[in-house]
Amino acid sequence: MSESKWILHYWGGFVGRAEFVRLIFEEAGVPFENNSDHCEEWFRKGKCRFGEAGIFPSFAPPLLQKGSFYLSSTPAICKYLGKQFGFFPKSEEDQAHAEQVNNAIHDYIGEARLAFHGVNHLASYFGQEKETQVYIDRFIAERLMLWLKHFEAVLRHNKGGSGFVIGDTLTYVDLALLHILRATEAQFPEQWKSAAADYAKLLNGFKARISARPNLAAYLASERCAKFSGNSMM
């Protein structure tokens, strides 16, 4: 399996949850292939090959593949790749806290996405824009600030928020936090600007600091980095 290439299966044309995974590959400088050829057939049309012929079952993309090894669920993929590429805390306590923060990050992105699909969470935002606006407004008014304040507190807990989320070196959680901050700024620019000047100053500094790392800066400035679509933080 070590000689096989990494393949990331995800819907074509979307930043989406696969961006969590892409950032890990890009920071690590590890080549991988983006592939959307079979996602429609495997997942939306119910012709999923996983679970057959000894391949481990997967419910939805993103789906990571290396040879005969398949892994889905974005938090699980990020944790796995963190171990593979050295973006993983050393102590058992730090590993547990990293997983806690990683899970909160994915809870946040999941909750924010649902606000844009309040009438039918399986359907596109487009077609339910008016009906779901009340859910978006409620998320902005009642949840966005609470989440950002929580992540600000998490960052502050480690040496006053001047470095990484956990410990003294970059982990997969730093890259996940970077993604949701970029997504938040893209989706809610006015709210992010206000937060960054007030209760999320550490998060804003963190975003700038991690984005400036050479591999990430090159990726974010490249055509490989897709633009956010402007709905549901994807």
Image: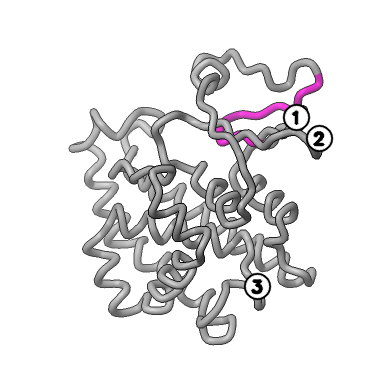
Query: Which residue is denoted by mark 1 in the rendering?
Result: 67
Label 3: how many Cα within 10 Å (few below 14, some 14–19, many 20+): some
Residue at image location 18% in from the left, 37% down from the top: 130
Q: Nearer the viewer, residue 207 or 75?
A: 207
The reply, left or right, for residue 154 in relation to residue 168 is: left
Question: Answer yes or no: do the residues labelled 1 and 2 have beta carbons within 8 Å?
Answer: yes
Q: Is residue 16 above or below residue 199?
A: above
Find residue 46 and report its horizontal and vertical position in percent. 56, 15
For badge 3, the amino acid type reads Thr
Q: Earlier in the sequence, mark 2 or mark 3?
A: 2
Q: Residue furthest bottom?
A: 160
Q: Secondary structure at mark 2?
A: loop
Find residue 53 and report its horizontal and vertical position in percent. 79, 16
Q: Is residue 15 magenta?
A: no
Total numbered circles: 3
Query: Which residue is denoted by mark 2 in the rendering?
Result: 1
Q: Is residue 96 above or below residue 228?
A: below
Find residue 124 and report its horizontal and vertical position in percent. 33, 30
Q: Secondary structure at mark 3?
A: loop
Q: Is residue 58 magenta?
A: yes
For badge 1, the amino acid type reads Gly
The reply, left or right, for residue 4 in relation to residue 232 is: right
Q: Secondary structure at mark 1?
A: loop
Q: Earlier in the sequence, mark 1 or mark 3?
A: 1
Image color mode = one colour
Residue at image location 54% in from the left, 60% down from the top: 175
Name the chief secondary structure element in magenta.
loop
Label 2: how many Cα within 10 Å (few below 14, some 14–19, many 20+): few
Corner quadrant of residue 217: bottom left
Q: Which residues are magenta?
A: 54-64
Label number found at residue 169: 3
